[in-house]
Image (spheres, grey):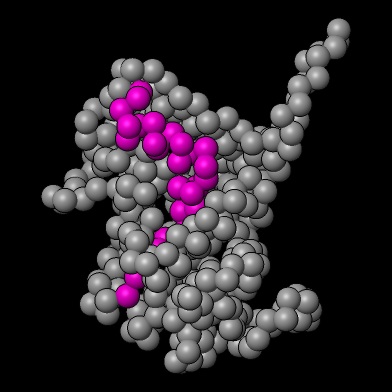
Amino acid sequence: MVNPIVVGIIGAGRIGRLHADNLRMMPLFKLKSISEAVIGEELLVWAESRNLGSIFVSGEDILNDPEIEAVFICTPTDSHAYWIEQAARAKKHIFCEKPISLSSAQTSKALQTVKEEGVLLQVGFNRRMDPNFRRLKQLVESGELGSPQIVKITSRDPQPPGEAYVRSSGGMFMDMTIHDFDMARYLMGEEVAEVYTRGANLIDPMFGRNGDVDTAVITLTFVSGAICVIDNSRKAVYGYDQRVEVFGSGGSAVADNCRPTTVEVSTAASVTRDQPLHFFLERYNQAFSEEIAAFARAIRLQEPIICSGLDGQQAERIAEAAKESHLTGLPVKLTHCAGEKASAM
């Protein structure tokens, strides 16, 4: 029998609580404690309803617990790199939400510490574990679609985030499109050579006031010459729009939106079906569970990490290039070191 992995969570916001609920459902994990900078009544009620153990104000209390083997970093993005370094030095395996940081230099420093301390780091690009996108990946790897030539990714949110969040998020490319940058690398299994962006403010002037965009089309050119087109919007009135197509020399494959039911109603007046699932918590519910199960297998069974620190850093580099292209109006070339490659899982 495999001993459960004793876990602590640093950051008990929406995503931290999601992971907490998923961890509690998995025999491979034992959630021992959580930390949150401000412990209010609502958090205490939530924790009590789940019979959670210790609640700390400081994540240091979690890192100082010798029983805890792994930590989940679910704090605001600007603190991710700090907690990665602290956790690595405490010899804890690390699951960190994306992105690793908002600075390439910070990310490199954090990854170097992880390497020096010999711990595992998985970055939370959960969409890699979505069964629809994994099927696309399998089709590409098997050669059934021939040589991939065009990838199309549509990713549109049902509603914009609040202004306070926008101010600290790092912008659309680092906060939202970064998932699509990772998906493009994941599906293609190769690096991006060039990024070209067209961004606009068409939804809410609030984004422009904060130096951000709410609508964008990004073209990625891979080292092989294959092309990926990503379109983003912060507001799709019909729901959470998540579609991917891979077109190759031997055919194409499409992953469509997930909906509450597959029922299509046809009448004399119209043909209708359900709107897409509301948002990421519903759309990627299974993927969130699968990614932490994969993290457990990496720790206990030495399976490869499904999304490494390098994967996280490469997605950040593409996001930085996308922003630069938006600001300059010019394509931005990326350089890569020998041996760099997207994780295959």
Q: Nearer the viewer, residue 198 or 241?
A: 241
Image location of residue 121, percent across then percent down: 37, 67
Image location of residue 66, percent across then percent down: 44, 92
Q: Which residues are magenta?
A: 119-145
Displayed quadrant of residue 187: top left
Up/down of 234 relative to 12, above or below: above
Up/down of 25 relative to 66, above or below: above
Image location of residue 39, percent across then percent down: 69, 83
**Which residue is outermost to the left?**
338
Q: Is residue 55 left or right of residue 272?
A: left
Q: Is residue 185 left or right of residue 210?
A: left
Image location of residue 295, percent across then percent down: 44, 64
Displayed quadrant of residue 94: bottom left
Residue 175 visible in the current orientation: no
**Which residue is outermost to the top?**
268
Residue at x 44%, y 81% (from the top left corner)? 69
* Residue 289 is a magenta residue: no
Up/down of 171 relative to 134, above or below: below
Q: Is residue 181 left or right of residue 282?
A: left
Residue at x 33%, y 17% (from the top left corner)? 250
**Which residue is outermost to the right?**
268
Residue at x 32%, y 35% (from the top left corner)? 141
